[in-house]
Image (cartoon, rainbow, N blue to C red):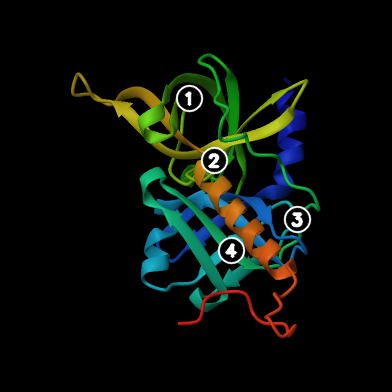
Amino acid sequence: MHWQNIVEKLAPYLVKVETPNGHGTGFLCLANHDKSILGVATAAHVVGHAEEWQQPIRLRSFHTGQDALFKDTERAIRIDWATDSAVILFSAGELDFPDSLIPLLPTAETLPIGVEIGWLGFPAIEAFTPCFFSGSVSARREDQSAYLIDGVAINGVSGGPVFYSTDADGVRIVGIITAYRANRATGDVLPGLSYAQDVSHFQKVIQDIQMIDEAKKAPPEENEDGEQGVRGNAG
């Protein structure tokens, strides 16, 4: 696994997610059929406060040097607090991304213990530089749809993509960094484990967008008189 090549491939999709209260990391995870609507995946706790208080959010791409400020009326956020996951939906045009997306790991697949993975983010100690981290899967938490990772996570990296690569499947994104749990069993702060939520919430949002696309493309139904009408139930 050549991390340098993988990081170069992922860099164009990576963004810094800035809010009035701080920042996190995100990555492009979806686009609708005509690429007029884009979606950036991140952690729910990164954007939750801004969403609740209708505050603006800035997305910054260090790969292109572009940034875009979205008021609460200019974007929508799909949040799942149970998995600390969120997708920021916005109109395309202000940020340039590659035409194709990095595949997400299918929901039915999970990574085995011991697999080496990497992640990217903007740590608070170097907030204007995308940084690379790596580690191994220590365990899978089925009850939390999460992985425990033997590796470091620093404030600001939350929402960063967690990924792995194989010769057969290429690079795939398996989740996002959401937390770091230090070992405090002895009272001291000792090295612990990072938490990575899987991509299940992002897969659901992608499916919802695909359903909307299909509904828009479907022809209107005809009534008994052969006239076209609008699909749906009248109130």
Q: Mark 4 points at which residue?
A: 89
Q: Image point 75% across, 55% down: which residue?
A: 97
Look at label 1 and name its amino acid. Gly
Please report whichever mark, 2 or 4, sits nearer to the chain's N-terminal start: 4
Please report whichever mark, 1 or 2, sits nearer to the chain's N-terminal start: 1
Q: Distance between the residues labelled 1 and 4?
A: 30 Å
Q: Name the residue under label 3.
A: 97
Q: Mark 2 points at which residue?
A: 199
Question: Is residue 8 shown left or right of residue 176?
Answer: right
Q: Distance between the residues labelled 2 and 4?
A: 16 Å
Please report whichever mark, 3 or 2, sits nearer to the chain's N-terminal start: 3
Q: Is residue 87 above or below residue 54?
A: above
Number of other residues with Cα within 10 Å of mark 3, as a class: few under 14, some 14 to 19, many 20 or more: some
Q: Mark 1 points at which residue?
A: 151
Q: In this view, does 116 lie above or below 68?
A: above
Nearer to the camera, 39 or 109: 109
Look at label 2 and name its amino acid. Val
Please report whichever mark, 3 or 4, sits nearer to the chain's N-terminal start: 4
The reply to whether discs 1 and 2 touch (Cβ–Cβ < 8 Å) is no
Mark 3 falls on what kind of element?
loop
Look at label 3 and name its amino acid. Phe
The reply to whether discs 3 and 2 touch (Cβ–Cβ < 8 Å) is no
